[in-house]
Amino acid sequence: MIRHGAGSMFLLILALGVLAWAQDAATSVTKKSEEGGLVRLPAPRLDGPMSVERAIQGRRSVRAFSGEALTLAELSQVLWAAYGITQPRPDGPAFLRGGLRAAPSAGGLYPLEIVVVAGQVTGLPAGIYRYVSEKHVLLPLRDGDRRLDLCQAALGQSWIRQAPAAIVYAAVFERTTKKYGQRGRDRYVCMDAGHSCENVYLQAQALGLGCCIAGAFDDDRVKQVLNMAAAEEPLCILAVGKTK
Ligand SMILES: Cc1cc2nc3c(=O)[nH]c(=O)nc-3n(C[C@H](O)[C@H](O)[C@H](O)COP(=O)(O)O)c2cc1C
């Protein structure tokens, strides 16, 4: 009886071991394939030749682009200014997702998702990418140059397809409304986006680039072009590039 019990126990431990190994293998395959396509961005620089005052003074909405490509370093800098982690908090609460960021956010809940529609960026295949602030990387979402699709979704505003890249802001309202309710939806999420967008404007100006925001677009078409999740709502599009 004792022998039989020990044998069963052995088999149970063996089965659990095999199960744990199988689960581990499955997880690492998923992790590998998710991380395999990530695009590492150059580290952002923390100084530059233009003062913040000059950037504020000089900033304008630019809708005429030279046709030159953006460099990956320029794109990286602009994304960092938008939503980069400026104070890592690896042991902070889960909702922080890595740390405090370049733009303020109500409750530190960071409801924005930042998606890049890249057409002409040196060293980056044309496609759609999600900016992952926690790792300062791009996660590929779709292949190919989708600027014309985005331009059409934005009521044909032609400068959107002429810019080498566009940054599309989406909101996951629930991250903010679960704490702040309707006030979060009516006010905070859009305030969060406004803060982040102005950072992009000023960073672009400081890099000698131009950008323009578009709030006029067909929500459903933008969602379709970007293949957005149901919980994400597009808020605005910022086209960025070298000024003509
Ligand atoms: C929320 C918001 C939405 C906007 N939407 C558009 C747009 O769809 N198309 C466009 O050409 N400009 C758009 N703009 C840019 C404004 O037209 C521009 O900021 C304004 O004319 C002032 O010019 P400035 O940014 O050069 O100071 C938008 C600006 C904001 C703040």
Image: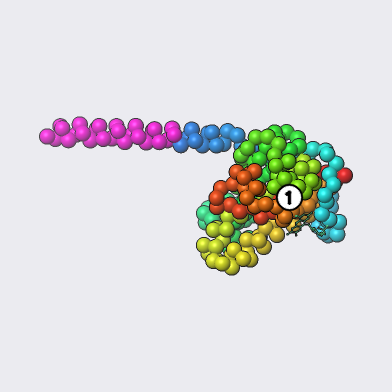
Seen at 39% across and 33% down, the residue is: 22
- Examine the residues drawn in magenta and state their main secondary structure: helix
- Rendering coords of residue 141 (x, y %): 61, 39
Q: Residue furthest right?
A: 244
Q: Residue at x 83, y 39 (%)?
A: 67
Q: Is residue 47 left or right of residue 33?
A: right
Please tell me whether residue 36 is drawn above or below residue 173 in the rendered image: above
Q: Please, what secondary structure does the residue beneath circle 1 have?
A: loop
Judging depth in this view, the residue of 103 and 210 nearest the camera is 210
Split into 4 quadrants, where in the image is the N terminus?
Answer: top left
Instruction: Give the residue displayed 85% in from the left and 41% down from the top.
Output: 66
- Residue 75 in the image, given as x and y percentages of width and height: 73, 43
Q: Is residue 30 left or right of residue 208?
A: left
Between residue 199 and residue 154, name the one nearer to us: 154
19 in the magenta segment:
yes
Can you see residue 242? Answer: yes
Mark 1, residues whose alpha carbon is within 10 Å: few (<14), some, or many (≥20)? few
What is the x, y in percent for residue 199? 74, 55
The residue beneath circle 1 is 155
Q: Which residues are magenta?
A: 1-26
The amino acid type found where label 1 is placed reads: Leu
| Quarter of the figure with residue 92 | bottom right
In which quadrant will I find the C terminus? top right
User: Does the beta carbon at disc 1 come under 8 Å from ligand 1?
Assistant: yes
Eyeballing the image, is 153 above or below 145?
Answer: below
The residue at the point 74 percent across, 53 percent down is 214
Count of numbered marks: 1
Judge left or right: residue 118 versus residue 177.
right
Task: Give coordinates of residue 79: x percent, y percent.
Answer: 70, 47
Colour style of the rendered protein structure: rainbow
Which quadrant of the picture is home to ligand 1? bottom right
Q: Is residue 74 visible?
A: no
